[in-house]
Image (spheres, grey):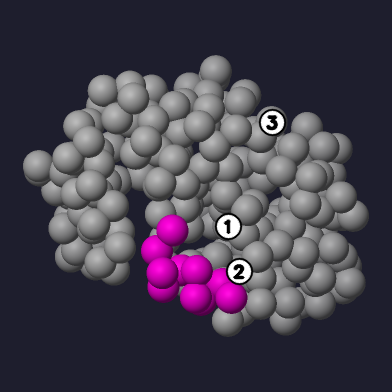
């Protein structure tokens, strides 16, 4: 699965690799890789494979799940589609509570004690998804874990998830993706090492 999802992400341009012309992240970091999993939604073939893989992963690791919760905004559509496949209710957690109406931070009906799996598109430092997990726990949910589409495997992210006592299962990861990228001639072996060195330096 990791290799198949990695190939799909590369084929639709959801993951861009530019070791010789780095992207600038919002933090100012110069990165040889940029991931935009929103493009999955407009690529039907990849979308079917990714959403089925999310559903399969949820049931493999969390068979007692009662509800899926997407991260805002990128995880919402994936939680909705996977929820439809699994015939499960879904909702999502806002980055911040609304300042009008009912001032909701969590959208969707979720009773205290509900066994929830969080659906995320990308794990980097882990900060945003941990905020979601904590909001759900504060609302009384039993968070079983996270299923994400892709992870960079950053040390900081791994450590943060461990500290928050929540596990993540990603459909694919950077190590697998760069292997596939070399095989498919998106990058050279030397460029692969540049990408891995960047990841390992953070």
Distance between the alpha carbons at the discs numbered 2 and 3: 23 Å
- 116 shown above or below 7: below
Q: Position of residue 188 (x, y in %)?
A: 20, 32
Q: Main secondary structure of the magenta part?
A: helix
Q: Which residue is mark 2?
A: 132
The residue under the point 23% across, 58% down is: 198
30 in magenta = no
Report whether residue 76 is seen: yes
Q: Position of residue 1 (x, y in %)?
A: 60, 33
Q: Do residues under tags 1 and 2 come within 8 Å of each other at their CB atoms?
A: yes
158 in magenta = yes
The residue under the point 46% across, 33% down is: 6
Residue 30 falls in image quadrant: bottom left
Q: Callout 1: 10 Å neighbours few (<14), some, many (20+)?
A: many
Question: How many numbered badges does the structure rendering display?
Answer: 3
Q: Secondary structure at mark 2?
A: helix
Q: Camera-side residue: 202 or 28?
A: 202
Q: Which residues are magenta?
A: 153-162
Q: Which residue is mark 1?
A: 71
In the image: residue 51, left or right of residue 159: right
Quadrant (top left/top right/bottom left/bottom right) for the C terminus: bottom left
Q: Position of residue 189 (x, y in %)?
A: 22, 36
Q: Which residue is mark 3?
A: 52
Q: Callout 3: 10 Å neighbours few (<14), some, many (20+)?
A: some
């Amino acid at each position: 699965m990791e290799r198949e999802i990695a190939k799909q992400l590369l084929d639709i341009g959801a993951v861009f690799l530019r070791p010789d012309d780095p992207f600038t992240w919002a933090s100012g970091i110069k990165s040889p890789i940029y991931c935009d999993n929103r493009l999955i939604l407009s690529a039907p073939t990849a979308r079917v494979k990714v959403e089925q893989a999310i559903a399969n992963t949820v049931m493999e690791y969390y068979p007692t799940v009662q509800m899926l919760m997407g991260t805002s905004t990128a995880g919402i559509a994936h939680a909705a589609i996977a929820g439809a496949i699994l015939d499960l209710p879904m909702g999502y957690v806002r980055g911040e509570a609304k300042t009008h109406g009912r001032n909701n931070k969590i959208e969707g009906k979720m009773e205290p004690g509900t066994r929830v799996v969080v659906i995320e598109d990308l794990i980097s430092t882990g900060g945003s998804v941990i905020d979601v997990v904590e909001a759900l726990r504060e609302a009384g949910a039993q968070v079983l874990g996270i299923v994400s589409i892709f992870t960079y495997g950053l040390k900081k992210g791994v450590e943060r998830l461990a500290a928050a006592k929540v596990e993540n299962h990603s459909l694919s990861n950077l190590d697998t993706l760069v292997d596939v990228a070399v095989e498919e001639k998106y990058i050279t072996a030397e460029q692969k090492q540049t990408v891995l060195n960047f990841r390992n330096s953070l």
